[in-house]
Image (spheres, rainbow, N blue to C red):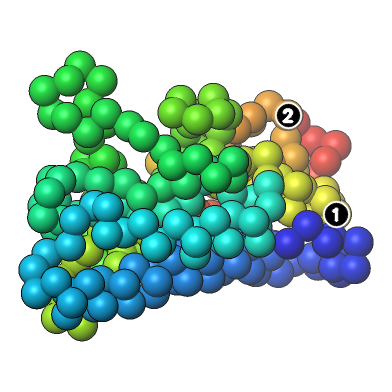
Amino acid sequence: MRDTDNFPAPATIESLADSVTKLADEVYLSLATIGTALTTLWAELTEKLRSAPRARDLAPLRETILAELESRGEMFNGAGAVMADSVLADHPRHLEWWLPTAQRLVLELNPGSEYFYDYTKMDWFTVPRDQGRRWVQGPHLDYACTDEYVCTFSTPVTITSGTFLGIAGADVPVAAIEEVLLARFQAFGQRVVLVNNEGRVIMGTDPEFTTGSKTSRMDSSAATVPIEAMPWSLRPLGSTGSH
């Protein structure tokens, strides 16, 4: 993922978009592995138990999730599965989410608490649940773990009956995205930014538009290039010498 020396400099904005798509596809490959592990385990558990599994029954997912964290290195801040409402027998909500330190992330999931973390209202959960497609939310500050900008990638996990079990997801630091893409952006020869569906900058080569800033001040006449199957787009801002 971080081997940019042998990657040819993109000649067009479209080929730069392909580089972003390639990065995203690598992330979603890991999420597919986690999702498959969840559906396989779920099938085994329901056949064995003849009832809905409990949160502790998901413990075998740990091995798969930690393997993906190790294989991705600094690309992932955390990854795992986030379960749908009341799909488990003992907990209405549950995260089987692990950090690279091999620690499970524990959040307050009690609706009565002032620190309640209601993931069922977050785009990275609701879009896969309601629309049955993969999504990425961010950049946003990861207050729960690292206090740095991350993008949360997610994909729906369903069983053969069509029941939505939850999502497989990963937090990807913007710094890791920059490590993969920045040299390619710089080789493009024009100032360019990668933006999300809300018009917020993820990364780019114009110091005026930093991560998290809005693009409303940009020239609206600049053509944008969408990223395939993602709510992101590239916006060229002209030559490196113009402002």
Which residue is under mark 2? 207
Viewer-nearest residue: 225 or 186: 186
Q: Which mark is residue 47?
A: none
Q: Quadrant of the N terminus?
A: bottom right
Image coordinates for residue 106, horizontal then vertical, percent = 36, 34
**Location of the C terminus (image quadrant):** top right
**Kind of residue sitting beneath label 2:** Pro
Location of residue 233 in the rendering, given as x and y in whole percent from the top left corner: 53, 54
Q: Nearer the viewer, residue 224 or 51?
A: 51
Q: Quadrant of residue 27?
A: bottom right
- Give the residue at x 74% y 66%: 12
Q: Position of residue 35 (x, y in %)?
A: 38, 68
The quadrant holding residue 72 is bottom right
Give the spatial CA distance, label 2 vs label 1. 16 Å
* Front-most of residues 242 and 113: 113
Q: Earlier in the sequence, mark 2 or mark 1?
A: 1
Under circle 1, the secondary element is helix
According to the picture, the residue beneath numbered tag 1 turns out to be 187
Instruction: Give the image location of residue 174, x and y in percent.
Output: 62, 41
Residue placed furthest toward the bottom: 160
Question: What residue lies at 18% left-to-right and 77% top-to-bottom?
Answer: 48
Outermost residue to the top: 114
Q: Is residue 97 above or below residue 51?
A: above
Q: Secondary structure at mark 2?
A: loop
Observer able to see residue 216: no
Circle 1 Cα neighbour tier, 10 Å, few/some/many (<14 / 14–19 / ≥20) = some
